[in-house]
Amino acid sequence: MTIIRSTDRDSYRTDEGSGRFYWWQGEGPFISVTNAIKLGIPSPYIAPWYAKVVAEHVDKYWDIEGDIRASCREAGAPEAFVKSLKALPVETRDAAGEFGTQVHDICESIMLRDPSGGTLTGDDMKIIQRVRQFIDFEKVMKPEYIAVEGIVFNREYGYAGAFDILCDLPGHGRVIIDIKTGKGVYGSAAIQQTAYRHGEFIAVGTDEVPMIETDGAMVLHLQATQWRLLPVETGEQSWSVFKSALHTAKWIIEHEAEAVGKPLVKGKG
């Protein structure tokens, strides 16, 4: 059986100031699923995590940071020190994203039985640990892959996104599975998977393959020493939440800048 796959995925998407968008045969932009969720359902954990990253860095490198701060002041650029600290959370987030991408790429090559796919760079041992867990998942669960890394589009609601795995899983039916490599799995994963299940078609080259009906969705959480397969709720409640997030995200992108008009009256009090 030929596994369905969206090839040349970068040709479908663009990253702009307001996030990621997809295009299809001249149609678009379609807001990405993750972009809609990020804008429409702001995470309450982001701000505390940003603060934690900076605090832990300063605590770890207290003496060095003091010297850097003094050097910046002597150079007449005290703002450079603050700027470097402000950039830390974004750099940490991007590094984690790159790590996850490398794990995904290697897992994809395993699913497609393609020995040329995926490369090891950076923290190789951590990547190898996750890949070993994925191989064990395959051995234990014996998934039968139908589609891998498929980009789905929904014209009616104007969104698109890429799911990781669509497979027949013995004992669990036909499911979409999202691979996660972070420390935890959060409720937004359910909303994300719900959006994928409601895609209208999968983009394969220039063809539209009708979205395959599934029985549910799961998250495969790959950790250093174990893997977990977690079911996520993708029913009407999650679909309603995603549509609300999508509506909010589109308002932010298209209308927020115009929501407040110019002053009608000014005073100097």
Image (cartoon, grey):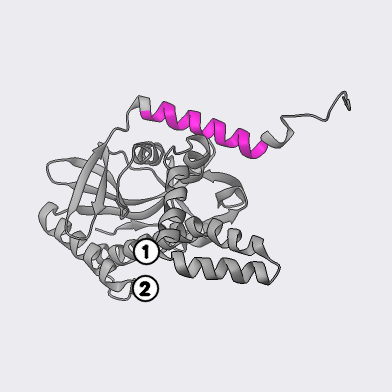
Q: Are marks 2 and 1 in contact (CB under 8 Å)?
A: yes
**Which residues are drawn in magenta?**
238-254
Say whether residue 115 is left or right of residue 143. Answer: right
Helix, strand, or loop for circle 2? Answer: loop
Under mark 2, the amino acid is: Gly
Q: Which residue is mark 2?
A: 122
Residue drawn at x 36%, y 25% is: 236
- Queried whether the magenta region covers residue 189, the answer comes back as no
Residue drawn at x 28%, y 59% is: 2
Question: Are there few (<14), some (14-19), or many (20+) residues within 10 Å of tag 2?
Answer: few
Q: Earlier in the sequence, mark 2 or mark 1?
A: 1
Say whether residue 63 is left or right of residue 135. Answer: right
Disc assigned to residue 99: 1
Q: Position of residue 139 (x, y in %)?
A: 12, 59
Q: Is residue 255 visible?
A: no
Q: Position of residue 186 (x, y in %)?
A: 33, 41
* C-alpha span from label 2 to label 1: 8 Å
Residue 45 quadrant = top left
Residue 56 vertical placement versus 254 (above, below): below
Residue 251 quadrant = top right
Magenta span: chief secondary structure? helix
Under mark 1, the amino acid is: Phe
Quadrant containing the N terminus is bottom left
Question: Are there few (<14), some (14-19), or many (20+) residues within 10 Å of tag 1?
Answer: many
Q: Is residue 264 visible?
A: yes
Quadrant containing the C terminus is top right
Residue 150 vertical placement versus 44 (above, below): below
Helix, strand, or loop for circle 1? Answer: helix
